[in-house]
Image: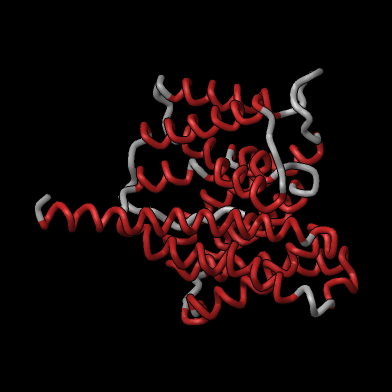
Amino acid sequence: MSLSLKTKTSATLVPVCLLIVAMISIQSGASLAKSLFPLIGAEGITTLRLGIGTLILFIIFRPWRMHFAAGNRLPLLIYGLSLGAMNYLFYLSLRTLPLGIAVALEFTGPLAVAMFSSRRPVDFLWVALAIMGLFFLLPLGEGIGSIDSLGAVYALGAGACWAIYIIFGQRAGGDHGPGTVAVGSLIAAIVFCPIGAWQTGSALLNADILPLALGVAILSTALPYSLEIIALPKIPARTFGTLMSLEPALAALSGMIFLNEHLSGIQWMALSAIIMASIGATLTIKPKPKIESLPQA
């Protein structure tokens, strides 16, 4: 192998490995967050993750140096609100759903954005695959899975918020740069932290929980977002999208390892159909010249 080929291979492999580590970190953080539900509930962990995560993001991105033009504030506001709602609804869904299934249902949001951005005949194949996966995951009839209906609604709602987050995140990010995620997180924290604190009550004041909540914030926010910022400029958009499509599988594995959650054969097939639809939509979509960091819940 020539030196130039080795260099090219290394230049591609390193950012791919960073993104894989980022995805593992996100799902590990979700598993840790779910393990705290008996202590402070989904609302409490949402509050702590948004609050601590916002502080970390402010230290990393220093958004106080940004200039906010009057005409660009609405996309930023919607971006922040969708970020907070996505986190809130996702953690609510985890109360009754296995992690892998919750992420698969949530992933229908960005999958819909990818498929609706192109209306070529091949996209109908990915739509059909996604619908098939949803049919076997959702409680649509007798004997189809054992998924909690309300949890599924919360996960799909988180997916809808993720879709809005992507659309308005691209607009806000184009105006304000990487610091957008810190400002969006602040907006989310201002709205959803008081709601979560009111619902959780004095349990949030337990000092023993703070180190674990810090771990959730680092694993789910600080570490993956930082790794993505390093990796994204160095890989093609198509590669990024394909790797992101593996999130539901990594979530299911994380649930098995850390939470002792096991999926049935039908649920694994349904999850695989959604992953295949996402990969197919990514590989056949018209690539964009620039990638924005679009983290999940």
Q: Along the line of sight, which residue is nearer the eye, 79 or 276?
A: 276
Q: Along the line of sight, which residue is nearer the eye, 139 or 62?
A: 139
**Residue 119: quadrant of the picture:** top left
Q: Which residue: 41% across, 19% down?
A: 121
Image-based side of 167 in relation to 161, left or right: left
Image-based side of 95 in relation to 296, left or right: right
Q: Position of residue 28 (x, y in %)?
A: 61, 57
User: Can residue 71 be seen in this snapshot?
Assistant: no
Q: Which residue: 75% across, 42% down?
A: 97
Q: Which residue: 55% across, 30% down?
A: 272
Question: In the displayed structure, would residue 16 be above or below residue 198?
Answer: above
Count of picture labels: 0
Q: Position of residue 258 (x, y in %)?
A: 67, 53
Q: Position of residue 279 (x, y in %)?
A: 44, 35
User: Can residue 240 be seen in this snapshot?
Assistant: yes
Image-based side of 224 in relation to 37, left or right: left
**Residue 283: quadrant of the picture:** top left
Q: Residue furthest right?
A: 202
Q: Quadrant of the C terminus?
A: bottom right
Colouring convention used in this rendered image of the protein? secondary structure
Image-based side of 46 in relation to 187, left or right: right
Q: Which residue: 47% across, 58% down?
A: 21
Question: In the displayed structure, would residue 211 be above or below residue 78?
Answer: below
